[in-house]
Image (cartoon, rainbow, N blue to C red):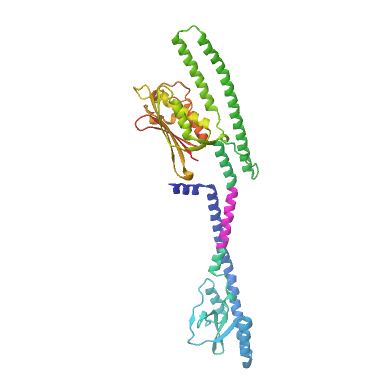
Amino acid sequence: MKFSLRLASLKSGLFWRTFFLLGALTTTSMTAWVGMISVVQHEPQVQQISSQVISVVTITHAALTHSAPELRRELLFELVSNEGIRVFPLEEDDKVEPPASNALMPDIEKLVKAKLGADTRFSSKVNGVAGFWVSFNIDDDQYWLMLERERIRGLTGIQWLGWASVVSVVSLVGAAFISSLINLPLRRLTQATRDFAQGKRPAPLPEKGPIEIMEANRSFNQMVDDLQQVESDRAVILAGISHDLRTPLARMQLEVEMANLSQEAREGMQSDIGQMDAIIGQFLDYAKPTEASSFINVDISELLTDTAHEASRLPDVRINTDIAPGAHAMGNATDIKRVINNLIENARRYGKTPGQDVTEIDIKCSVKGMHTSKRVIIEVQDHGSGVPPDQIEQLLKPFTRLDTARGQANGAGLGLAIVERVITRHNAELHVRNRDGGGLQIQIVMKAL
């Protein structure tokens, strides 16, 4: 599974796409260049080598023909020592191997035979001696003239392959460098977006480079500033609304206490005022930002134990705990505790087993995985009637209340929305599902320390 994900990432990553495209373009261009050079150089190289062979054979033939017999030995020695040319008599029993098989040799043979005669022979090795061998006649005698192959040899296939490999490596390194330059601004933008989604304030992106990248970075920086300002303004507005609403609520509470009302009417009005105050608190909790800069090493085990102990004091709740010791994660302890309290309150309100006066709530915590893959898993579940499977996703939406499935709701429908918002800011996972045996199970998965 992990291999397939990595392979998919490899195929879809912009860096690798750019790298492979540049590599393919470079390889295609180099192949075309080599083919073009081979075609263009073929004829001139054939002409050059043929002319050289014809000239050497002709000059050697003339020198041997017109020199005095007593000076021929000295002439042959000079040809060997200075020119690398050897002349041997051609014998019938010579062991002759065919000439080298390459693209140039057939055309070279054709041109040389046209000048020196159709009976001219060629060989790559005579009597075990390697070289470029050409036969020629002096009167009725036949001779071998041997040239060093280095004098007439162009680039071999191995040499072409070597140069092509060097060019390919250099081209691929250049493609990787170019891909990195192209991908760097996008990688910075992706990381900044991810940090912002996790509640962090990303460092401003550099507003330089190509005009498209510069404009994208400038727009992102402006967006971050605008959203931060909106978040700040919203917190100030909601704080002001809270103060303005809770002040008259406090006066109403006082007037209810002092009014000449029946006990039933007084308790009903006090309940309504309490609900209004709770709804205001939910709005503030939902709007409150969770700053990543406030994250510390939180002892999740201790926090859950304390929260469960506090919840167990409620008269209509029974808390069952299974909390593994030593579970630690980075986060805001206050916000995590608020999340757990919201889940407990949600279970207390809507998770009561039919026919029972006490709501049974299970709180579990475990640590799974090894090293960098360690995870803290928190579970809060009730034993109620659960939620229809097709409506589970609706639970996390703000202002959503599933009255028919979970009983009557007295809040604003922000409890699980607050949980989802805080968990997202902690870069954790939230899973909501029906519990085996009845009830709702809410699971939080955090990266363990």
Image coordinates for residue 16, horizontal then vertical, percent: 53, 50
Image coordinates for residue 237, horizontal then vertical, percent: 59, 23
The residue sitting at 62% across, 81% down in the picture is 83
Q: Closer to the camera, 353 or 317?
A: 317
Image coordinates for residue 44, horizontal then vertical, percent: 60, 70
Residue 91, placed above or below residue 423: below
Residue 160, placed above or below residue 142: above
Residue 348, placed above or below residue 172: above
121 in magenta: no
Tally the marks: 0
Quarter of image, res 165? bottom right
Dominant secondary structure of the residues highlighted in magenta in the image: helix
Q: Residue furthest top?
A: 260
> Range of the magenta residues?
165-182
The residue sitting at 52% across, 32% down in the picture is 333
The residue sitting at 56% across, 38% down in the picture is 195
Image coordinates for residue 103, horizontal then vertical, percent: 52, 71
174 in magenta: yes
The residue sitting at 48% across, 45% down in the picture is 371
Q: Residue furthest bottom?
A: 70
Q: Closer to the camera, 190 or 446?
A: 446
Q: Closer to the camera, 192 or 116?
A: 192
